[in-house]
Every structure is written in C-alpha cells, then in structure tokens.
Amino acid sequence: MHIPDGFIDGRTAAVAGVISAVGVGFALRQVRRELPPRRVPLLGLSAAFLFAAQMVNFPVAGGTSGHLVGGTLVAALLGPSAAVVVVTTVLIVQCFLFQDGGVTALGANVFNMAIINSVVGYLIYRVVCRWLTGVRGRVTAIAFAAWCATVLAAISCAGQLAWSGTIPWSVAFPAMTTVHMFIGVGEGLISALVFLAVYRARPDLITETTQMAQTQRLGELVGYGLLVTLGIAVFIAPFACSWPDGLDSVAEKFGFNHKLAAPLLAAPAPDYQVPGIHWAVGATATAGAVGSLIVFALALLMGRWLVPKPKDS
Amino acid sequence: MNAAIEITNLKYRYHDGTEALRGVSFCITSGECVALLGPNGSGKSTLLLHLNGILPEKLSGDGAVKILGEPVAPEKLEAVRRQVGLVFQDPDDQLFCPTVQEDVAFGPQQLGLGDAEVAARVQKALAQVGLAGFGHRATHHLSHGEKRRVCLAGVLACEPAILILDEPTSDLDPRGRREFKALLRQIPATKLIATHDLELVVELCSRAIVLDRGSVVADGPVFELLNDEQLMLEHGLERPHILWHVHPH
Amino acid sequence: MAGAQAKGLVSVHLIHHFHGRHESPIHRLPAALKLGLALVIIVATVLAPIQWRGWFLGVAGLLVLMAIVSRLPPFFLFRRLLALSPFVLGVVLVNAYQPAGRVNWLGVAFKSVLCLLTVILVSNTTPFSQILRVLKSIRVPALLITTIALMHRYLFVLMDEAERMRRARASRTFTRGRRFHWRALATVVGQLFIRASERAERIYDAMCARGWK
C-alpha cells in the first residue's frame, strides 16, 4: 500500500502531510510522557522487528504469500502512540533506504498505515476486548481489529488516489477495498497468532496497558479520533456521500465565497465513469458491511480454536 | 588496603523468585587482574551488573557493593560509572551507534567533555585497540573481532579505573583471541574478567574466583585453583591443558 | 510492500551495502546539498503539469548524468526502478478503458520514475548517518531520530536472527501442512519480538553503563 511519488498530487500530499505531522507530533508527545526511559530503545527495536517480521513470508496458495504490516499488532503490544511512532519510523526508513513509498507521498502513507492502522486498530481492539474477556477475547479482538484497520487504510488510500485524479473513485474504491478485504484476513490471522505467541511466552512484555489514568487515555484517544475523523472527512467522505453539493448550498446560505474553497473540496462525482462498473461502489460498500460480520464470526471461531477453554483463566 | 571493588554478602533474586546470588563476598585490590569463573547459569553476568549499579533495579545504597571505597548508591551512580567500565557480553548490545566514531565518542560525550577532548579520546582509544582510522566505518559492517575491539575502545575512552569484561573472547577466532589478549595485557586498570576461556585466565590473571549457583566456592591464586582438578570438574570447569606446558614461576 | 521484500537475506544486503562499495564525486557531495536538491526536484516534478515537457526532459537528463557520474551499476538502478511496475500497471489498466482519460498515465508513470530515480541516487550515495544528521538539523524531534537510528542499526541484526530462526525451524519441519507452517512462522515472529524486547533492555543497560541519563 505504499504510494509512490507522482500518484498523488500536490494538494493531497500537502493536506495528508499536515494531518500526519500533527498526528505523529501528538504521538511523540504522548510517548515522551508515558514511556519510562527504560523502554525508549524498544521503539527503535520494535521498528526493526516490524521490518524483519515483514520479511517472513507466510505461504498462501500458489506462489503468493501473506505479509504482516503490523500497526495493530504493535498497538496491542505497546499502545497506540508507540505504534504510531514505530510504524512511522518503518515508513521513513523504507522510503529513504529502500525507496518503498514516495517522499511526497510520505504524509499519505503515514496517515494510512501508521495512524489509521494503529489508532483505529487499537480502538476496535479495546472495544472488542471490553466485550469479550480473557485471552480468547484478546485474540478475537486483535484479529478483527487488524482486518478492519487494513480495510479502512485501503479505503483512505483509494480516497487519496481519487482526490488526486490518478484513479477515479469508482475504480479505486472497489479495487483497493476488495483486495484488502482478503489481505486483511492474512493480517488479522498473523497478528493474532503472533500476539498469542508473545502473550504465552512473555506476557510481561505487553505494555499497552500502562499505568495511565483512564481519563488520560480517553483524552489521548479523543485526540486521535478527531484527527482520523478529519482525515476521513477529507479523503473519503466527499466520495462516499455527495457532501460538496450540500456543503456548497450551506456555504451559499452563509454567504461564503465557496468558489475559493472549491479547490480544497473533492470533485462531487468521479470525473468519468468507467463503463460497466459504476455499480461497483455500492456493491463494495455492501460487501464491506457483510464482510465485517463474516470476519468477526471467523475471528470468534479462530479465538475458540487457538485458545482452548480449560487453560483460559 | 587499596580496595577497588569490595563486595559484602551480596544477594539477588530474579523476578520469578529464583536466587541468583546468595551472599557473595570478595575484595579486589587496585591493579589486580582477577578472573571470574563458573559454569553457565552461575550468576556471573548478574554479579557484574551489580558493579556499576544497573542491578538491583531499586538501588538501596546499603553498601553491599563498594567501588573505590564508596557504596554504590543512587546519588553516586554517575561517579561510579565514570570509574567502572563494563564491556558487555554481546557486542551488538553495546554498539548502538551507527558509526565507530560516534559509538566510541558516546561515553566521553556523556561525561560532558568538549568536542576537541572527545575527539582526542576517541583517537587514542581506537589506537589503543589497533583500529586507528576506523572512525567512519558503520558498526553493523564490522567483523565480530572488530566489534569487540570497538566495544573495548568505547569503554577505554572514558578512562575508567576499573575494567570489567563479560566473556570478552567468546566467538573469536584464534587470532582474534590472541590479539585481544595482547590488548588487555597492556591496559593498566584493575581488571575483572568473567570468562570460560581458561587459557586467557592463565595468561592474564593472577587470581581467580569461582562462582557456582550464586555462591563463591573458591577464591585464590590462578595456578593453585586451576590445578585443582577435582574442584574444576565439580564446578563445571576443567583443568586447562596449558597448565601442563607452563611453569608456575 | 513490493520493493523491499526479499525471500532471503542476500538480496536485501545487496541493496543496502551498495553505497559503501563505490566512490564518486556524487558520493563526496555534502548530504544536506543532495537532500535539499532532491527534495526540490521531487516536489517540483510532482507539482509540474504534464504539459511542461521541457522540465521533465531537463530533469531526466540531469538525473541520467548524475547516475553516470555516481558510477552506480546501471542494472542495479534499473532493477530498483522496476519496483514501480505494479502501480503503473494498475493505472495503465484503469485508463485503458478510457479513450480520453483525464489522467495521462504516461505522465504519472514518468513523474514516478523521475522521483524514484532521484531518491535511489541520493540514498545510495549518502551514508545513512549523514541523512540522520540533516534531519536533526531541520529540527525533527530527537525521539524520532533516536528511534530511526536504532531501527537502522538493528535492522540487519534482527533480519539475520529471523533468518536463522526460520532456517532452524525449517530444518525440523517434515510436514508440508500449511496450517502447521503458519503457526510455526508466527512463533518465530513472536520470538523475534521477545528477543527484540530483551535486546532493547540490554541496550538501555549498555547506554546507562556509559553514563546516559
């Protein structure tokens, strides 16, 4: 999902860059406050770990293989802010050292893979954990959360490509989303398996539940939530709903010179419909909704299979 | 008596409750070169981590460990670490900077020295270990032997009074071992070396302390201890062949 | 994740160790200059409209000249540029439907190639520690710089560990069942995290031992 240079235009890159800079800055501040000095090298080492782990090929049918992106996994192990910093580090090194992902696209890539993956994944993970307790609950939670985060990141990426005019929404959304609904299964499965392996061997290394007060953690999540919502509003919403029309009329009512704002808003509809698949958008959205229910059920089954009941305390 | 290191009844337990050190006591005078022997799991590395205050995690300053006469206490940590240079077992753990120059400079910089002084110390330390001109090399490109020597240089750059080494010659090829031995011989500091390399012990050290299961089971001159075959075998060691060929005087 | 993934250690090491083996005027230029220039080229190329053919040709010419002067092996450069192909293919396919697509797929592809070539040239002629120093001078937060530095330092250490564990595991795998294979690989990855965590603690101890506060 690493977007190269040239695939997103200046406007998208700039907006994504600003949002990501704020997000990463916020994450760094949080990490500096919560992380004991003893754990500082762990950030760098976790980034190295993630990169090394991404090299491990999990064989799937034929010649293909699954990989781990790992944002949700790291968030479940170290907390959301640490995960944002860790994944951002991985992306920066991948960009400069391995030319994986563009320099101007760094903002977008960081938003999709570091922020959405870590934050949304973590949020869903905690929500599901609250509902299903125990080790089995955690395994289910992380599998489902990783899947959701992968799909949402893909949607965001599609939005960025569409906003830049590189690929129209009507193609980008169905293509990216359906592909990542399948990739997400691998990510969820691998995240859960790895989490379980770590939990069984050294549960003390899982530091995502720090001594932070409930209110502080809530504040942190609200901060991230706002940022993610902004990103979604900018990259996804204009395509998902015909906002700009509504926004236009609202602006007119209040006398804003909406023409000035026009360059900042996405085009109300894709510039052109690719013949034959204009229904793909609606179909994908439905598939996504149904898919998440199916994946959740699968995650539950997997939890049951991986964590036998008698040992569960 | 000029005690560089004084340990009195040191005890330590791991997180899971197992006793790592059960009342260890010994004294090392300035200028001595002492070997710390013992089978794997005897607590050698754990003991060494007590000598510069990394362990116990909550320092009480109760005086179980005294460096140059001062108990290792939280307020004195900086001073202790200035005087005690610890070379870790895995050079990759210690070489955390990207280039050799930066890594050897780390210690002097933490000591608060000026740029010129730091550069001078780095040069001197690298020359001491025979790696002059290696400053610009990337740490992860070095061979194992070179890494070990850079670690030593990094510690020597701080000019400590006491040098502590944890398995310094393990994983080295014979030439690497010989070179490292020659290096150590030239360093005048008080030395405590935890090692399995019994030939190194015979050639460098005057005294040996044997640790087994957290307790000191023997403490005396090298030749006496190492020649005691029964003692050696009982504690997971052996009588080194080199003793057959070396005269004790 | 197309470009960087390699099935074994060897190819990744080849990618990375390159700048150390060559010397050229480009290698000797100050890092800040190279990075600054690269940034200008990349941003301008991305922002420039497709119609500015002069700009694109000029940049292309400059980059090819730099590539030659830098003495980097051309086949190596070409292989790195191929990493773009899946994306370009995707865009081409989409636009194949459109007789008059607004998106000039050729333009997008060309822009990407130019930008990629710029990054390849800079990253292979500049030691990473110098790049970090430049980042530090533009006030990137210290915690992020430390994290990037440590990641870079221990990247190969961990990859070697991962490869060793994988080989050891494979040596004892006699079944061809995919289910067992996944669990085994997940255990390897889990172990990798544990080892990374333990190493991180030892690094902290080593830093403290030399006076870090």
Image (cartoon, coloured by chain):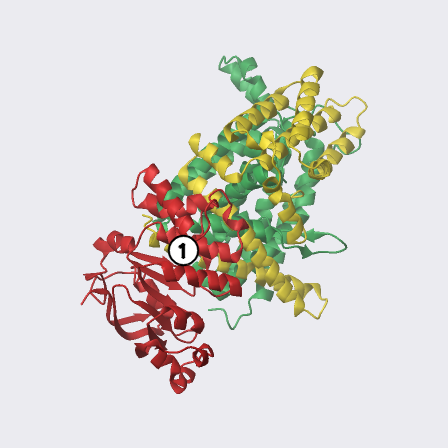
- Identify the element where label 1 is drawn: helix
The residue type indicated by label 1 comes to Leu
Q: Nearer the viewer, residue A254 or B91?
A: B91
Reading the image, the residue beneath label 1 is: B152
The correct choice, above or below, for C188 with respect to C86 in the image is below
Chain (red): B
Q: Residue at x 64, y 61 (%)?
A: C182
Q: Nearer the viewer, residue A273 or C132?
A: C132
x and y percentages locating residue A37 in the rendered image:
35, 50
Residue A62 visible: yes
Q: Nearer the viewer, residue A167 or A110?
A: A110
The correct choice, above or below, for A160 with respect to A113 in the image is above
Lateral position of residue B63 relative to residue A28, left or right: left
Lateral position of residue B98 relative to residue A280, left or right: left
x and y percentages locating residue B189 in the rendered image:
31, 59
The correct choice, above or below, for C79 with respect to B245 in the image is above
Q: Residue at x 30, y 64 (%)?
A: B50
Q: Nearer the viewer, residue B76 or A203?
A: B76
Q: Residue at x 30, y 70 (%)?
A: B12
Mark 1, chain letter?
Answer: B
Screen quadrant of the N terminus of chain A = top right
Chain A's colour is green
Q: Answer few, some or many: residues within 10 Å of disc 1's Cα (few below 14, many 20 plus, some between 14 and 19).
A: many
Lateral position of residue B242 relative to residue C83, left or right: left
Quarter of the image where one finds residue A152: top right
Chain C's colour is yellow
Q: Residue at x 42, y 69 (%)?
A: B200
x and y percentages locating residue C51 in the rendered image:
71, 16
x and y percentages locating residue B46 in the rendered image:
36, 67
